[in-house]
Image (cartoon, grey):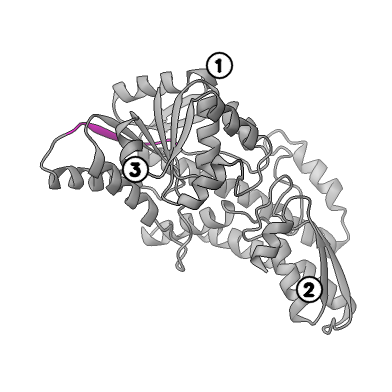
Amino acid sequence: MRISIFGSGYVGLVQAAVFSEVGHDVICMDIDRDRIARIQNDDIPFFEPGLSGLLQAGLTQQRLRFTTNSQDAVENSDYLFVCVGTPSLPDGSADLQAVIAVATDIAKHMTSRKVIVNKSTVPVGTADQVHRCIADGLAARQISIPFEVCSNPEFLKEGSALADALKPDRIIVGARSEETVAEFRRLYESFNRNHDKMMFMDPRSAELTKYASNAMLATKISFINEIANIAEAVGADIESVRQGMGSDSRIGFQFIYPGIGYGGSCFPKDVRALDHLAKERGTGAQLLSAVHTTNERQKQKLSDRILSRLGPDLTGRTVAVWGLAFKPNTDDMREAPSRVLMEAIWAAGGRVVAFDPEAMDNCRTIY
């Protein structure tokens, strides 16, 4: 099947790699010419285990190619996956500028039926917004072409994204027509052989499923960190408490490991966006606000502890920081707890010596 991926970031490249790996013909489009040139020369802008090899295999087998021409990507594919960034705005909402730009380009170049798929993490109602944008673009051209806008959120974990994409727990699809549902079954046939992992729903429910999933995982992290703080205050052993909690099958052990808070590109952004959406719609989201506040406070705890032990002035002292990325097997330092720690040490006059097996170059770029 003919697929175009709009966006050569983390989600876009992983999706392009796995779709080409299972035999689809894939075009990966990005407006950044330098970025595309780097990727074609096997210079991936971020670290993800196994991704480089899979991309090179797709290029060698001629099932994958890259372009900066949006018309090429639209005209030569039937399924158009939107995989662009949706960063946080100052009020916590998601910035959909790149998503709408892709939709505008699609409307400009469409000449036949297309299925447009939002893979990016987007607020509830974005599929409808993209549909209106494309419909308006076609109307401006005074033509009528059938199309459908669907939601197919990604559930990738940095550091294990290829395994997550090739062997997903579930495949969520928000689609309205039976024709499109049947097409998605063919599209994901190679990922769905052992048992049916596909779950079909309306686009708004699919969009909310993505946000709700990440918010739930973030909630578990903030919860166990608060329990750890209580355990320390009352003289309890948090590891024993964790084992006791996790042994309950209703709770389980995943995401109840106390630490210094979550970071990365997903949990912080998605919790803020869902919180903003709830407030915007008048429902309120006290729990989501508390999850975010707890996490920000937890990030500060390690530096607070260092300063309480060593004093507020670290001039002449050196602190070693082992691990910079927000989790193992990635170079991603977006909202990483290490940044809060290092910046607090520098603010107190201290010196940092840091190491990370993957994130050193990224750290130098940031600082």
**At label 3, which amino acid type do we have?**
Ser
Residue 148 forms part of the magenta stretch:
yes
Instruction: Name the residue at 50% across, 29% down.
Output: 171
Q: Residue 251: within the magenta?
A: no
Instruction: Describe the element under mark 2 as helix, strand or loop.
Output: helix
Task: Work out which residue is located at the far left of the displayed protein and give it.
Answer: 142
| Circle 2 or circle 3, nearest the eye | 3
Residue identified by numbered label 2: 304
The one of 310 and 60 positioned closer to us in this rendering: 60
Tell me which numbered mark, 2 or 3, is placed earlier along the sequence.
Answer: 3
Q: Residue at x 42, y 31 (%)?
A: 173
Residue count near mark 2 (Cα–Cα under 10 Å), binned few <14, some 14–19, many ≥20:
some
Name the residue beneath numbered marker 3.
70
**Residue 195's mark?**
1
Q: Residue at x 36, y 21 (%)?
A: 183
Magenta extent: 145-152
- Tell me the distance, in whole angstroms, between the alpha carbons under discs 1 and 3: 36 Å
313 or 124, which lies in front? 313
Disc 1 marks a residue whose amino acid type is: His
Residue 340 is drawn in which quadrant? bottom right
**Residue 258 x %, y %:** 76, 53
Bin the neighbour count of mark 3 within 10 Å (Cα to Cα): few under 14, some 14-19, many 20 and up.
some
State whether residue 149 appears in this view. Answer: no
Q: Main secondary structure of the magenta part?
A: strand
Within 10 Å of disc 1 (Cα), the crowding (few <14, some 14-19, many 20+) is few
**On the rendered image, what quadrant is the C terminus found in?**
bottom right
Left or right: 78 in relation to 144: right
Give the amino acid type for the residue marked by disc 2 in the picture: Asp
Q: CA distance from mark 2 to mark 1?
A: 49 Å
